[in-house]
Image (spheres, rainbow, N blue to C red):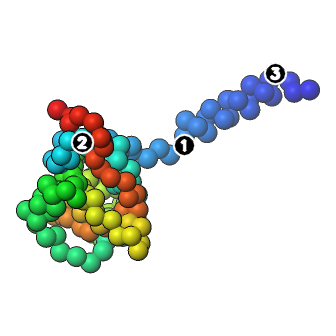
Amino acid sequence: MISYRRAALGLAAVFLLAACAHREPRLQIPDRNVADCESRSVKQTAIESIVASTDDTVRPGTYPGDKPLMKIVKSPVGGVFAYWKHQPIRMPNTAKALGVSGDYLDLRRAVITNQVDAATHSRPIWLTFATPGGEKTVLERAYDTQNVCIEGQREI
């Protein structure tokens, strides 16, 4: 039989450990987005999930510019330009590659198209971060391949 005192101490220890546990900043819904999903709307949770599925590895590549990517986003392929004012995200390898100390970066924009590489079950994703040297855009790979557009009404 367990004494009430021992049970209370055990429960207090569990609560203390839970209170001290490290919590990652949550990805928030973008402050705004630009997409062309025809008669569908942007699935906000898809943006979160796709960004969270990146492999934290900067890939070789030169940002092609907004205009060519917007052309893909506005085509039947679809996609989204998602913008945040301030979104902390833990990406230690990317931070190191960008010369930023620590494990966290300030995500400002994600450019996601619905172009999926069937061979790797991934998609390219362009991420823009605020750094002490100015905004930097890098190419990474995301493994969540869901479509960023869903059936339904456009969000206003």
Q: Secondary structure at mark 1?
A: loop
Q: 151 or 17, which is in the foreground?
A: 151
Q: Could you tell whether 27 is left or right of 19 in the image?
A: left
Res. 4 mark? 3
Residue 101 in picture, x, y percent from top left: 32, 63
The answer for how far apart the CA atoms under marks 3 and 1 are is: 26 Å
Quadrant of the rendered image containing residue 40 = top left
Q: Residue furthest right?
A: 1
* Earlier sequence position, callout 3 versus callout 1: 3
Vertical order, 4 against 46 (above or below)? above
Binning the other alpha carbons within 10 Å of mark 2 as few (below 14), some (14 to 19) or many (20 upward) gives some
| Residue designated by label 2 | 40
- Contact between marks 2 and 1 (CB within 8 A): the answer is no
| Residue 132 visible to an observer of this rendering | no
Residue at position x 7%, y 62% in the image: 67
Residue at position x 68%, y 34% in the image: 13
Residue 75 in picture, x, y percent from top left: 15, 57
Vertical order, 17 against 56 (above or below)? above
Residue 98 in picture, x, y percent from top left: 26, 68
Amino acid on which the number 2 mark rests in the picture: Arg
Q: 10 or 110, which is in the foreground?
A: 110
